[in-house]
Amino acid sequence: MMTTPVGRVTQGQFSFLPDLDDAEIVLQIEYGLARGYAWSIEYTDDPHPRNTYWEMYGLPMFDLRDAAGVLMELNACRATFPGHYVRLMAFDSTRGVESIAMSLIVNRPADEPGFGLLRQEAEGRTLRYTVRGYAAERPEGQRY
Amino acid sequence: MNHALYAIPGMTPALREPVPAPAPAPPAGARTVGQMLERCQVEPVLDELDRDLVGLAMLKQRVRDIAALLVIDALRLEFGLPSRSPSLHMCFTGNPGTGKTTVALRMVQILHRLGRSRKGHLVCVTRDDLVGQYIGHTAPKTREVLKKAMGGVLFIDEAYYLYRPENERDYGQEAIEILLQVMENQREDVVVILAGYRPRMDVFFQSNPGMHSRIAHHLEFPDYGHDELLRIGDAMLREMDYAFDDQARVAFADYLALRLARPNFANARSVRNALDRARLRQATRLFSERDRPLTREDLTTLVAADIRGSRLFTTAQAA
């Protein structure tokens, strides 16, 4: 459960691939900007698959024309949270869509212990399952 | 980074090493300045600048110099010679209405054509857009503006307002520091143009020597002379599909002579306002003749009466 061939958290785009370098990230950002998306940066140290809402790093960046602006903000976020998961998200504001169109992890901790599956025995032979990150046992801020 | 926990048969090992960057292209293509100019299509913009803007000879020469440097840099790059991207931050000083914003717009096009500005857009801001209202408000605001300007040109109008010496706790200083940092570290990404009136900009630079030394090009916009203003008026009318008749042109020359002597003369902007008022009077004149069929000429011609109707003439006679 939760274990992938790459042995690390796989969420969003390109997460089975080796980490994108900055030039490749810039290409992705440019693609999003060309489609009219607004990029935003989020970070967390609790990458549970059901943890949809990560912390926002600054406000979403509307009206940008060039990837350099997003990259500047991303580097500031990496410097602030070097051991956290950081993801870039592109918001598509087209009427009727109005949701996140792209999402990619651009920074991750050096060591990712992964997730454990907890089984709870319930009435009869019922089993209830829950997923718990090993790192999440420690308090916030000391997880990675 | 974690290693794979198991292998899938037939799986190719993930590529961990970054792909080596391709070697710089051999010097193919443009060899001469002419070819490079043709390729980047910058000459039409330069010619347009020469044609559309009246006067400003020194300034046009300076813009051409900058363009020449960029073209030569591009040629150097073709030969694989190192070319440190030059600092292109500029400062436009001049009185109101001398064409600072107009030249900034053209500058953006030139930089874009020469590949020095990736997106070629102009972000015009003033103090209000950069400086916040309370502690901790300025930095995000300034950074947001800078992010929007990345890949283009940031034009800070009336830049001297950023620094208010009379209030030592003014947040403007914070905005200046962030600007300086980005101007230095990301000079490939953004070109900053400061604009303002000469005496006030001098005070601004005296109190911010770091800003002065980081700006490579200080461009001075001189005031226009009487004849230049007349030509500007003609050009503006042509743009709006109007024209003076002969007497109106004389009247407008008289008007300019009177207006130049008055305070608060804002060069081309005053000319534009004067022409707008003349159009108002022309409209009123035509409006009063209800039954006359109007020709195309009537609608496009400003006559002497439209100019002479200005209050300036009546006050001049009274004086």
Image (cartoon, coloured by chain):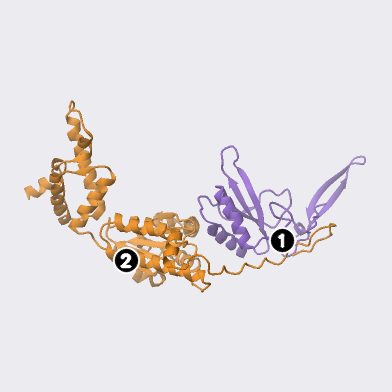
Chain colours: A purple, B orange
* Residue A47 image-quadrant placement: bottom right
Please, what secondary structure does the residue beneath circle 2 have?
Answer: helix
- In the image, A80 versus A18, the foreground residue is A18
Which residue is depicted at the point 15% across and 56% down? B261
Which residue is depicted at the point 78% across and 62% down? B13
In the image, B240: left or right of B7?
A: left
Where residue B151 appears, x then y in whole percent? 49, 58
* Residue B204 image-quadrant placement: bottom left
Where residue A137 appears, x then y in whole percent? 77, 58
In the image, A44: left or right of B148?
A: right
Identify which amino acid the numbered label 2 is placed on: Gln
- In the image, B103 versus B140, the foreground residue is B103
What is the chain identity of the residue bearing mark 2?
Answer: B
On residue A18, the disc is: 1
Where residue B286 appears, x then y in whole percent? 19, 33
Q: Quadrant of the C terminus of chain A?
A: bottom right
Disc 1 residue crowd, few under 14, some 14–19, many 20+, Cα 10 Å: some
Identify which amino acid the numbered label 1 is placed on: Pro
In the image, A63: left or right of A18?
A: left
In the image, B167: left or right of A129?
A: left
What is the chain identity of the residue bearing mark 1?
Answer: A
On residue B180, the disc is: none
- CA–CA distance in space, label 2 to label 1: 51 Å
Which residue is depicted at the point 80% across and 57% down? A5
- In the image, B240 versus B156, the foreground residue is B240
Q: Which residue is mark 2?
A: B61
